[in-house]
Amino acid sequence: HIHQTGRGGAGITGKLPSFAENTELHLLDLSSNTMTGTIPTDFLSGVKGDRFEMEVDISFNGFTGTVPAELNRFSKMKLTAIRTEITKVDEALCEMRDWWNGEVGLVADSDRDESGCDAILCPKGTYNKFGRAKSGPGGRCLDCPGGEYAGQTTCDGTEDTDDNVDYNKDKKILDKLYVETGGKNWTGADAWGRGGAVCTYEGVTCVTNDGTNG
């Protein structure tokens, strides 16, 4: 995980590098910084072969634009990009059926009239607690008329489903724990204390009604 805290606590700023010269890279966590700009089309272009599943987390940054089609060079990937200002996933990635342990294919094949891209990021104008669609109960991206970005985990002015109410109870307990135990001084506390969904807190695993992990 790459994070640099200065006096302002903003972490890393600036544009997203392509990391094109990092040939063996397969795990990259740039979450919880204040980086901006678009994802470059040559992002991770130097990675050799397809031996490993790529795991990339760029959540909680100011990235904009579209998740580029060029990432289809990876047959298997877990791309986490919730709570950014990205507005779209390129349609070429909707066919990457093995991404997210096959969830892209499962969502595309479901009877919920959702695209495989929804399993990468909930589209603009929708949300759920994961920021992306998941197969099984409770995994649909829900309408959020005022939603400006893809990958939203909350929606102003909406009522919670029963599933979300349970998670919100847990969130209140964990938020209180964070405040009362000096959470700002914790190590390994990405997403804690930032107002996001509890399922995005580092070290927290959410489980849906069907028993799958969030």
Image: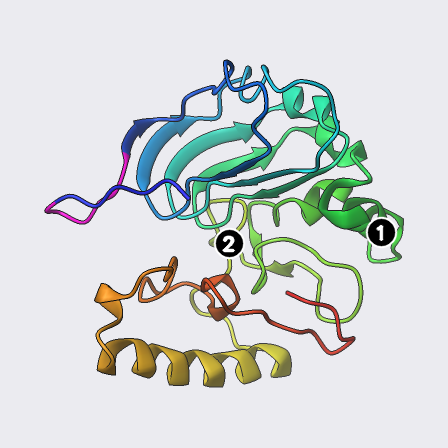
Assign a secondary structure to mark 2. Answer: loop
Q: Residue at x 77, y 30 (%)?
A: 75
Residue that carries the numbered disc 1 in the rendered image: 106
**Towards the viewer: 192 or 148:** 192
Image coordinates of residue 205 in percent, x first then y, are: 58, 69
Residue 63 included in the magenta stretch of the image:
no
Tell me how far mark 1 sits from mark 2, CA to CA.
21 Å
Q: Locate residue 207: give its quadrant.
A: bottom right
Above or below 145: residue 176: below
Residue that carries the numbered disc 2 in the rendered image: 152
Q: Is 33 left, or right, of 144 in this rendering?
A: left
Assign a secondary structure to mark 1. Answer: helix
Q: Residue at x 71, y 21 (%)?
A: 73
Q: Which mark is residue 174?
A: none
Q: Is 102 left, or right, of 109 in this rendering?
A: left
Quadrant where the C terminus lies?
Answer: bottom right
**Towards the viewer: 70 or 142:** 70
Above or below 13: residue 42: above
Which one is closest to the eye, mark 1 or mark 2? 1
Image coordinates of residue 6 in percent, x first then y, are: 15, 43
Q: Residue at x 48, y 80 (%)?
A: 168
Residue extending farthest to the left is 7
Image coordinates of residue 155 in percent, x first then y, are: 47, 63
Specify whether residue 155 is in view. Answer: no
Q: Amino acid at mark 1?
A: Leu
Q: Residue at x 47, y 85 (%)?
A: 169
Q: Residues within 10 Å of mark 2 (few under 14, many from 20)?
A: many
Q: Amino acid at mark 2?
A: Gln
Q: Locate residue 192: give its quadrant.
A: bottom left
Magenta part of the protein: which range?
Answer: 7-12
Image coordinates of residue 31 in percent, x first then y, are: 41, 45
Quadrant where the N terminus lies?
Answer: top left
